[in-house]
Image (spheres, coloured by chain):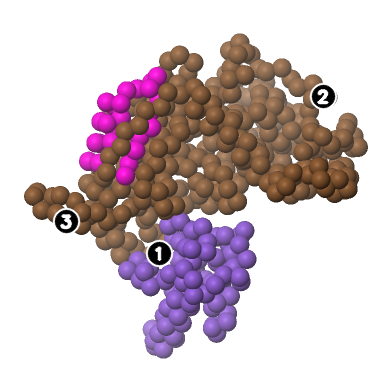
Chain colours: A purple, B brown
Amino acid sequence: MNDAEMREKVLGILAELAPEVDVHALKPAVRLRDQLDLDSMDFLNFLIGIDEQLGVDIPEADYPKLPTLDAIYSYLQQRLSQAGARPSS
Amino acid sequence: MAEFRMPVLGADMKAGELVAWLKQPGEPVQKGEVIAEVETDKAVVEIESMYTGVVEKLLIEKGDKVPVGTPLALIQTEGPEEAPPVSRVEPPPERRARPAGRPPPAPAAAGRLRVSPVAQKLADEKAVDLSKVSGSGPGGRIMVQDVEAAIAAAAATPAAAPAAAPAGRSLRMRQSIAAAMSRSHREIPHFYVESVIDLSRAIAWLSEQNARRPVAQRLIYGALLVKAAAVALEKTPELNAVWAEDHVELKPAVHVGVAVALPGGGLVAPAIHDTDKLPLDELMTRFRDLVRRARAGRLRSSELTDPTITVTSLGEAGAESVFGLIYPPQVALVGFGRLTERPWAVEGRVEVRKVIHASLAGDHRALDGYRGGVYLAELDRLLQEPESL
């Protein structure tokens, strides 16, 4: 999966959670919770979507690392590249 | 033969529109099985059958909007005829004046608003008041072209159109909430008690649990609060009750209604059935499912009629405390505010703790402040032992 596909999947998951919002108009450097009316249930559903669609299970300890779209993209790039580099068993 | 009637799906509901029949004449139906979809001012609701039997006849058509209590279908029941269950949501005051046990009169054909679903959808989108639209379809049914004509007429006289009128659905949602909350404020003598609860231990326990779980099985602290709010009722069962005219009726089962904010504004508070009996994992699963379906407008009738107490949490919206209005005929509402870190005196030392403001709104006709205080103390005690929940 390339970077553009990953970003599109992230936006697709957000679009399901907030269908009233044009997710492509979100500002990547601004806190998501300042742009979307997300509560903790929505955020958990977002993470479940990431796990289901990208195969990345984000531990709770890493939640503070994900305040913006830019931060989420960066985090996922790192996790996906680590997974790609890991020898398959 | 039993009459399956339009149920009361909220204290404020006066009518519902049939969106779809999910059973046809000749098909068997079980009690509790979804038989139809009905649109209220708040959502499309899956209506569960109150009877087991065979569908004999459908009495209204898709698109028909009829008052609560109107017979929708005839069901050939098995064995002795079942008595119709008593609605667990008290009807609005004007309907309560009717003699008990008698259905409301069937609506006059002229009084029925017959609207095609496509026309209704367009009217909702364009905020068209259908009561002012003449229907050109069979029996005066309002068709999409009638709504389009009304829109065109309104556009021709822009000065008459209200500025920034909300969309039809959100306007009706607001009106529905206005009716229920006005009634609550008018009829219920509220009292409030509040406690600040140290949640440090509960949050630490949840973090420990979540660290061991895959993301799909993690818990949010809101689920813990709902479970604690339900279990605490064992000590003060009089809070799990409804007010019926002039006396309180205790409810044997605990069905917590959880307030869910909806996209575009408004809220619903559907029930998580038997909340106090559910293991926390199961409660979390149902909570997630309920929020998802509430926001998608896919709730079931029993979820709207069965709540015995409501829990609302506005902490994530930024409020430190919540002092809500009770949803009639319930007699209590539990409110949670924001989780914050505060200096907290512990055995002569000051420590930083994660705390939350918990409030109880009580109906003073049904209970007293003292019992509200006992309830909050029990809630606090339970949240200090999260593993017991």
Query: Is residue B140 found inside the magenta-colored segment of the image?
Result: no
Front residue of B362 and A13: B362
Residue occupied by mark 3: B351
Query: Which chain does tag 1 point to?
Result: B
Quarter of the rendering containing residue A5: bottom right
Range drawn in magenta: B357-381
State the residue at coordinates (30%, 37%): B194
Q: In terms of sequence position, does the residue under pointer 2 or pointer 3 come before the other?
A: 2
Q: Secondary structure at mark 3?
A: strand
* Amino acid of disc 3: Glu
Query: Which chain does tag 3 point to?
Result: B
Front residue of B59 and B9: B9
Residue occupied by mark 2: B109
Q: Secondary structure at mark 2?
A: helix
**Residue A1 screen position, x and y as percent:** 54, 83
* Amino acid of disc 2: Ala
Q: CA distance from mark 2 to mark 3?
A: 69 Å
Q: CA distance from mark 3 to mark 1?
A: 31 Å
Mark closer to the observer (3, 1)? 3
Mark closer to the observer (2, 1)? 2
State the residue at coordinates (55%, 77%): A7
Q: CA distance from mark 2 to mark 1?
A: 54 Å
Say which mark, if any, is on residue B215.
1
**Residue B146 screen position, x and y as percent:** 87, 42
For residue A28, side relative to residue B95 (left or right): left
For residue B83, side relative to residue B159 (left or right): left
